[in-house]
Amino acid sequence: PVARSPDATAVVMFTSGTTGDPKGVRLTVGNFAASAVASAVRLGVTPDDRYLCCLPMYHMGGFATILRTTLYGTTLVVQPSFDAGLTASIIVEHSIVGVSLVPPQLRRLLDRGWSPPDYLRTVLVGGAPTPPALVERCEAAGVPIYPTYGATETTSQITTARPATAFEHPATVGQPLLFTDVTVLRDGKPVAAGKTGEIVVDGPTVTPGYLDPERTAAATGEHGLHTGDLGHRDEDGRLWVEGRL
């Protein structure tokens, strides 16, 4: 057996976020394990699950599916590149129960008149804001959409809304995952529910730092990792992302 410390760097993923400035993000064995557990609690997982990966594996959305299915011991089906017609066929051919998409991919599926099979349990949508109108289209088409907000620095998901929450509040990205703390700060201080500020994240899925120590120091503080994103939370802890600082 290979010894694996939870604090050992397992992967370095480069992300530019919305700044266009590449940053090397260190992610540990513990980051991935915590992310897999928290995602399973929110999305559900069974031994017979088959998850489809049609996202680039050099981005967190695609790479996370590889690590999670390996940790769960479930099946991963890999589609080399997204094609709306082919993806719809693969979901049926391989009895897919879960798939991760970005909003334009989901929109293309719906534009083709796609009706998901009953056994498709999870359509995790992230990587960019999911328009409320797209959520409403999913409700009409019977698509079990899980709008999510995440980052490479947090090993993917930070918050995720289940379908019932998404259909009731189409603009929300849901509540934080298990073990994840989300704080909204304005002028360095936490604000009350309904008030807009910077979204700051803490917990076991958060990177121990970038390759550049100075960048790490600039992005972290008392409440965790400063995302640079603006948003607010409601009284029930649901998060709305409103833009960038």
Image: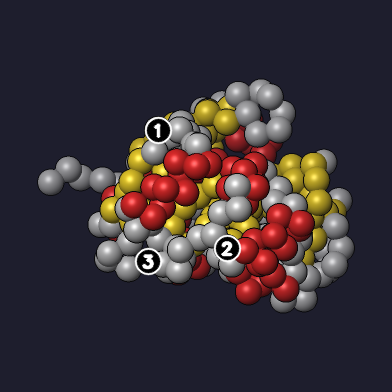
Q: Position of residue 11 (x, y in %)?
A: 40, 35
Of residue 62 and residue 41, the one placed in the foreground of this image is 62
From this viewpoint, which residue is outermost toward the left? 1
Q: Is residue 169 visible?
A: yes
Of residue 64 and residue 100, the one placed in the foreground of this image is 100
Residue 143 marker: 2
Q: Position of residue 70 (x, y in %)?
A: 29, 50
* Secondary element at image label 3: loop
Kind of residue indicated by mark 1:
Pro
Identity of the residue drawn at 81% across and 70% down: 193
Image check: 143 left or right of 136? Answer: left
Depicted 137 relative to depicted 66: above or below: below
Of residue 83 and residue 36, the one placed in the foreground of this image is 83
Residue annotated with mark 3: 45
Q: Are marks 1 and 2 in contact (CB under 8 Å)?
A: no
Kind of residue indicated by mark 3:
Val
Q: Is residue 202 visible?
A: no
Q: What is the CA distance from the residue labelled 1 to the residue labelled 2?
A: 23 Å
Residue 80 marker: 1
Image check: 45 left or right of 2? Answer: right
Kind of residue indicated by mark 2:
Val
**Mark 2 vs mark 3: which is more N-terminal?**
3
Image check: 5 left or right of 220? Answer: left
Identity of the residue drawn at 74% across and 69% down: 169
Q: Residues within 10 Å of mark 2 (few under 14, many from 20)?
A: many
Identity of the residue drawn at 65% across and 34% down: 17
Q: What is the CA distance from the residue labelled 3 to the residue labelled 1?
A: 24 Å
**Mark 1 vs mark 2: which is more N-terminal?**
1
Depicted 88 relative to depicted 38: above or below: above
Q: Are marks 2 and 3 in contact (CB under 8 Å)?
A: no
